[in-house]
Image (cartoon, rainbow, N blue to C red):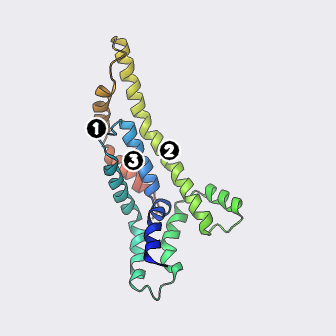
């Protein structure tokens, strides 16, 4: 296959066969929860998602690296085995069974593992997103109630809530908790 085909398929492979989808959804939830779309530009969130995904995928990539040195003798199955193992280990059994029955294929078939992995990842990402968004929403409701009680219902809440949300996030060690939960959520 020509190199340009692999380069064209790389973004799709990155999104579907790695931890990138889950990591980017969770980091986007953080960005939205903080209400800091201007404070945290999408490019910074994307860069962090790529780095965290590389940390998560590191063991699988390191086991493929020796095989890539001798491409001529390595079979595609040998090269893809660590990735397939990663996908299988991090896929919900219920999702795997659902897609196996839906398509009538083996559980190890890529057309079963890949969609099951993606749906599992999105489910886990949405669970984490709720855990991230809920405290920020409660903080915003409390500040809105205080503004209403003070007789200031029309004032912009973002001027008060953004610094409070950032302080809350930094005060609990948000980066360590979030990245630790993302990396720790994968079996190696």
| Residue linked to disc 2 | 127
Instruction: Say few, some or many: other residues with alpha carbon within 10 Å of mark 3 (under 14 / 14 to 19 / 20 or more).
Output: many
Q: Kindly give the residue lying farthest to the bottom in the view shown.
A: 73
Alpha carbon separation for disc pair 3 and 1 = 18 Å
Sequence-first disc among 1 and 2: 2
As drawn, the label of residue 171 is 1
Instruction: Indicate left or right for 163 with 137 as reference.
Output: left
| Residue linked to disc 3 | 27
Asked whether 141 or 103 is in front, the reply is: 103
Please identify, in this view, whether the residue under mark 2 or under mark 3 is nearer the observer.
3
Instruction: Indicate left or right for 78 with 98 as reference.
Output: left
- At which x and y percent is residue 146? 35, 17
Cβ atoms at labels 3 and 1 below 8 Å apart: no
Please identify, in this view, whether the residue under mark 1 or under mark 2 is nearer the observer.
2
Q: Which residue is drawn at the image coordinates 49% and 69% (left, top)?
A: 83
Quadrant in the picture for residue 48:
bottom left
Report helix, strand or loop for mark 2: helix
Q: Is residue 117 above or below residue 126?
A: below
Q: Which residue is drawn at the image coordinates 42% and 81% (left, top)?
A: 67
């Amino acid at each position: 296959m020509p190199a340009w085909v692999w380069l064209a398929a790389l973004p799709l492979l990155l999104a579907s066969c790695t931890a990138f989808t889950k990591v980017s959804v969770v980091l986007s939830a953080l960005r939205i929860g903080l209400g800091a779309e201007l404070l945290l530009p999408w490019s910074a969130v994307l860069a962090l998602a790529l780095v965290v995904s590389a940390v998560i995928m590191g063991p699988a990539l390191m086991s493929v690296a020796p095989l890539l040195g001798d491409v001529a003798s390595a079979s595609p199955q040998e090269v893809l085995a660590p990735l397939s193992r990663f996908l299988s280990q991090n896929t919900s059994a219920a999702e795997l069974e659902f897609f196996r029955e839906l398509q009538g294929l083996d559980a190890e078939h890529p057309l079963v593992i890949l969609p099951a992995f993606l749906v599992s990842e999105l489910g886990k990402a949405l669970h984490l997103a709720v855990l991230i968004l809920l405290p920020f929403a409660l903080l915003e409701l409390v500040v809105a109630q205080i503004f209403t009680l003070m007789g200031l219902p029309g004032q912009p809440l973002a001027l008060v809530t953004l610094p409070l949300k950032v302080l809350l996030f930094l005060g609990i060690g948000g980066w360590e908790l979030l990245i630790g939960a993302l990396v720790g959520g994968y079996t190696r």
